[in-house]
Image: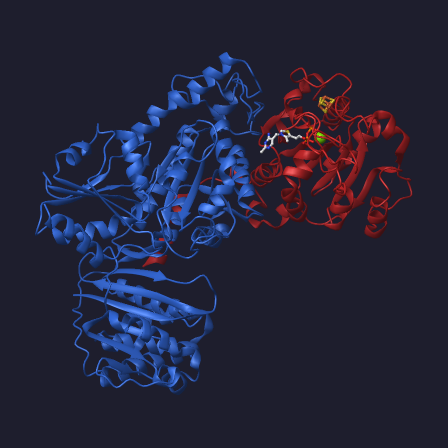
């Protein structure tokens, strides 16, 4: 049985009060509750405050480049699909620098879980606007203010028919854990956008700001209805924010189509040169 | 005997079919074949060439003149009639190109009509053309017939019979009508050669080195490798994925490598430019990866379907920060096969990125070889897995060690955790910032490993007399043309070839003192398919040595044997 101590990592270097702590705790608790052991997990991240999470927990870890968490996560899952591949990433990492990968990872539907710490800001680089920063925000690097439409990860994911789309909030641990659990149990690509106040650089989207707007999705809501899900995703973010599983589409994961890994993960398949010898004959 | 057949036409007219069949049957019949292609970046129209040189002795480069010009369109005649040898023949279908030529070097063979009459459809006009060429050179149809039977096996006996009849009709027509044909193709006792191009040789080399993951994004001239791997994926259990871009490709391949399999990616210079940050990641996380850089003329999109050796320095220096790498530049498809294997071995042994750098010319040229010997292939599983991993007490991904190489464990196969980080890290793989750990890590991954990697590098190949007065040097795909040119000039001068196929770490002189050859020669010439002499820069930086003369070509085309002989002769004469 895995325990919380098994998941104890290095001491986080996050600011006191940062929303990242809630996500870290929820993730560790989820894995323990699901009785998943650290060596069965690969935590994959890019670069940012969020992306440091793997060091503060325990698991196999691929802490790669800024924006590039999804490609290695995909590679890892295809080589050993017995592993739980969990991506911890930020709004800049996943929606900005790595936006193209997100679009195509959703399309591929590899069975990996993506937990985005969405603080609507670049934390690590000290407060520049991110793709989810609200319009009008001023920063040192946006002297005219942000006038690009905020990226709506939920709507985009539903538009791409992502097989699992949810939103959670770091300050609501029970809901966050249940969403994480459902995402991990789901077969296919799961995107969970987690609202995460950055107490140091985001003075707009504070705990209070989120608290005032967040609400739980009704129990009767059917996440398999794509049109309803899309409607929900278009609710004005500055007024109300739905929390919970917003969209689900059960369909085969990418791995299911890869005949060569049906029986055995690629990593466990031996290399047999003898069997290839006949390839030479094709050139005569 | 040494003949060249040049086939010209528009894209989509079947040049590949005719050229492919001719090269294959000639090599199978036991002749040495050297074929190369010259095509435009378009799917239809334009002007493309397929050149096949064949002989009864080893040949390794293209010539400038053609003995038989197969003109599938009028443009081919207009552009290439001047390239005919004195006894050369232009074969064409006057009905198709709607023009008749009366001079004796022209031979009209109604490909379409023959195909319709003997096979029932114009589709078979390419078969008629192959038959006609064989008739012209006085070769029997037997080998071609075998190829036809095999190629159309799935389509049934009727299709086979129609093609055989068409080939026969084309053959007979040319034999009867080509009174001027005086080609002599003596029978060979050879049992037939292997015929392979650079792209397939790299793919085959990867497959036979245990590559289990190949991903990439299409870009000429690297696409052939992706195609080859794709064609073997299901049979041999290779995960092949076309990624959304090259940034994804290298990062995905690194994920695969981390998870425990041999991984490779490849592109042309432009796509490799996008991979550069990922290359640096490979250096930092010390994961094995093989990267194929298939050059084409740049900058930017350049000449997409043509050739150049313009990305050598880029490949050597790409990536921010300092980390070791190995760079291999095969000169022939055979070298490409074995060096791809070596690249995989070195990459995993030292946990570094290693490169195969070639170009459009090598990728697309087909050569004949006696065969590849799979017993010469290296396969050592350097990873920590299975029992050895289970028995390991404490595991640290970046444990300091005597040679800088830390155990490379496969994640998920034991309780041990494998942690890699693109930040500077400690032995366990966790982020650090202190100078002391930083220094030790740089020592470990760079200073400790580098001399060991350098030791693995083979010296250049020298072909020539013991004390040459003239040394002609080159690297990568110029191997064949330099070798043949020097081979022809050796009767006139004391001249030798020095060819480098393992470029970085730059070979030392411990195993072979090639520098003395250069120092003692009266004239040294460096031949490169680029404008700035990138290899010369590498030699200068590594040894301080400067070549006497530079021969450079950057028009997007490879060196041609006759032209190179002329240039070399010009310099040698002045000695
Ligand atoms: C290629 C590249 N560009 C820029 C950076 C600098 N950088 C590191 S993290 C980051 C933004 C992080 O924002 P986010 O992903 O939202 O993470 P947060 O710190 O907010 O959790 C930037 C711009 C980098 N490391 N690499
Ligand atoms: S800067 Fe913001 S996101 Fe980063 S640790 Fe501090 S509060 Fe958290
Ligand atoms: Mg952020």
Q: Is residue B30 visible?
A: no
Quadrant showing the C terminus of chain B = top left
Side (left or right) of A206 relative to B503: right
**Residue B506, position as x, y percentages in the image:** 30, 32
Side (left or right) of A85 relative to B148: right
Residue farthest to the front?
A144
Side (left or right) of B66 relative to B398: left
Chain coloured red: which letter? A
Location of residue B13 by image quarter: bottom left
**Residue B358, position as x, y percentages in the image:** 36, 47
Question: Is A54 above or below relative to B223?
Answer: above
Quadrant showing the N terminus of chain B = bottom left
Q: How many labels does the image show?
A: 0
**Residue A165, position as x, y percentages in the image:** 77, 42
Question: Is A158 above or below relative to B44?
Answer: above
Q: Can residue A26 be seen in this view?
A: yes
Chain B, chosen colour in render: blue
Side (left or right) of A5 relative to B106: right
Colour option used: by chain
Residue under the point 47% across and 64% down: B42
Residue under the point 28% across and 64% down: B52
**Residue A103, position as x, y percentages in the image:** 67, 46
Location of residue B95 by image quarter: bottom left
Camera-side residue of B149 and A190: A190
Location of residue A46 by image quarter: top right
Camera-side residue of B149 and B480: B480
Camera-side residue of B496 and A187: B496
């Amino acid at each position: 049985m895995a325990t919380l101590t098994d998941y104890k990592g290095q001491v986080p270097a996050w600011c006191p009060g940062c929303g990242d702590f809630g996500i870290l705790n929820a993730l560790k608790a989820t894995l323990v509750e699901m009785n998943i052991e650290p060596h069965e997990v690969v935590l994959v991240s890019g670069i940012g405050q969020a992306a440091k999470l793997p060091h503060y927990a325990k698991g196999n870890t691929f802490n790669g480049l800024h924006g590039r968490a999804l490609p290695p996560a995909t590679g890892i899952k295809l080589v050993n699909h017995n592993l739980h591949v969990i991506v911890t990433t930020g709004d800049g990492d996943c929606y900005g620098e790595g936006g193209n990968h997100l679009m195509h990872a959703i399309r591929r539907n590899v069975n990996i879980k993506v937990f985005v710490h969405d603080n609507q800001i670049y934390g690590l680089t000290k407060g520049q606007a991110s793709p989810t920063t609200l319009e009008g925000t001023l920063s040192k690097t946006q002297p005219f203010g942000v006038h690009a439409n905020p990226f709506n990860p939920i709507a985009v994911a539903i538009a791409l028919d992502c097989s699992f789309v949810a939103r959670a909030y770091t300050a609501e641990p029970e809901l966050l854990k249940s969403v994480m659990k459902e995402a991990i149990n789901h077969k296919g690509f799961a995107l969970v956008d987690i609202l995460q106040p950055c107490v140091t650089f985001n003075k707009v989207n504070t705990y209070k700001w989120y608290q005032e707007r967040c609400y739980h999705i009704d129990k009767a809501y059917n996440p398999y209805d794509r049109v309803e899900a899309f409607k929900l995703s278009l609710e004005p973010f500055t007024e109300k924010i739905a929390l919970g599983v917003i969209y689900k589409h059960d369909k085969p994961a990418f791995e299911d189509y890869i005949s060569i890994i049906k029986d055995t993960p690629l990593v466990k398949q031996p290399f047999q040169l003898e069997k290839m010898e006949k390839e030479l004959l094709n050139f005569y | 005997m040494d003949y060249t057949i040049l086939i010209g036409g528009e894209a989509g007219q079947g040049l590949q079919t005719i050229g492919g069949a001719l090269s294959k049957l000639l090599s199978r019949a036991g002749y040495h074949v050297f074929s190369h292609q010259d095509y435009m970046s378009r799917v239809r129209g334009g002007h493309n060439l397929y050149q096949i040189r064949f002989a009864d002795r080893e040949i390794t480069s293209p010539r400038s003149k053609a003995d038989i010009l197969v003109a599938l369109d009028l443009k081919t005649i207009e552009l290439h009639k001047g390239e005919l040898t004195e006894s050369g023949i232009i074969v064409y279908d006057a009905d198709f190109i709607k023009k008749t030529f009366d001079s004796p070097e022209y031979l009209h063979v109604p490909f379409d009509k023959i195909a319709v009459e003997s096979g029932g459809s114009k589709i078979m006009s390419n078969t008629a053309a192959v038959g006609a060429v064989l008739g012209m050179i006085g070769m029997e149809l037997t080998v071609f017939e075998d190829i036809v039977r095999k190629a159309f096996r799935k389509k049934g006996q009727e299709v086979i019979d129609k093609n055989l009849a068409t080939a026969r009709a084309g053959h007979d027509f040319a034999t009867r009508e080509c009174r001027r044909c005086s080609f002599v193709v003596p029978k060979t006792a050879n049992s037939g050669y292997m015929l392979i191009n650079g792209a397939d040789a790299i793919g085959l080399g990867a497959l036979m080195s245990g590559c289990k993951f190949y991903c990439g994004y299409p870009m000429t001239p690297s696409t052939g490798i992706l195609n080859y791997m794709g064609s073997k994926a299901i049979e041999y259990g290779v995960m092949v994925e076309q990624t959304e871009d090259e940034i994804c490709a290298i990062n995905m391949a690194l994920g695969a490598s981390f998870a425990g399999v041999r991984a490779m990616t490849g592109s042309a210079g432009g796509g490799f430019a996008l991979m550069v940050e990922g290359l640096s990641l490979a250096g930092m996380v010390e994961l094995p990866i093989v990267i194929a850089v298939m050059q084409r003329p740049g900058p930017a999109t350049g000449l997409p379907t043509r050739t150049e050796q313009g990305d050598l320095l880029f490949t050597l220096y790409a990536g921010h920060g300092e980390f070791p790498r190995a760079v291999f530049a095969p000169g022939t498809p055979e070298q490409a096969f074995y060096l791809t294997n070596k690249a995989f071995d070195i990459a995993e042994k030292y946990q570094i990125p290693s490169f195969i750098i070639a170009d459009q010319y090598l990728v697309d040229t087909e050569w004949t070889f006696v065969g590849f010997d799979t017993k010469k292939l290296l396969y050592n599983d350097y990873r920590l897995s299975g029992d050895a991993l289970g028995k390991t007490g404490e595991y640290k991904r970046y444990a300091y060690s005597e040679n800088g190489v830390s155990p490379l464990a496969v994640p998920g196969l034991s309780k041990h955790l494998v942690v890699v980080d693109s930040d500077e890290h400690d032995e366990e793989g966790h982020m650090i910032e202190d100078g002391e750990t930083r220094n030790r890590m740089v020592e470990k991954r760079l200073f400790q490993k580098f001399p060991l990697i350098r030791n693995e590098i083979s010296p250049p190949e020298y072909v020539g007399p013991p004390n040459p007065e003239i040394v002609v040097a080159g690297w990568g795909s110029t191997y064949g043309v330099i070798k043949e040119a020097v081979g022809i000039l050796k009767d006139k001068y004391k001249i030798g070839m020095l060819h480098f196929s393992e470029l970085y770490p730059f070979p030392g002189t411990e195993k072979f003192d090639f520098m003395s050859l250069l120092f003692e020669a009266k004239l040294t010439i460096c031949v490169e398919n680029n404008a700035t002499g990138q290899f010369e820069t590498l030699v200068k930086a590594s040894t301080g040595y400067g070549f006497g003369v530079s021969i450079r070509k950057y028009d997007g085309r490879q060196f041609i044997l006759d032209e190179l002989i002329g240039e070399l002769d010009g310099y040698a004469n002045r000695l």
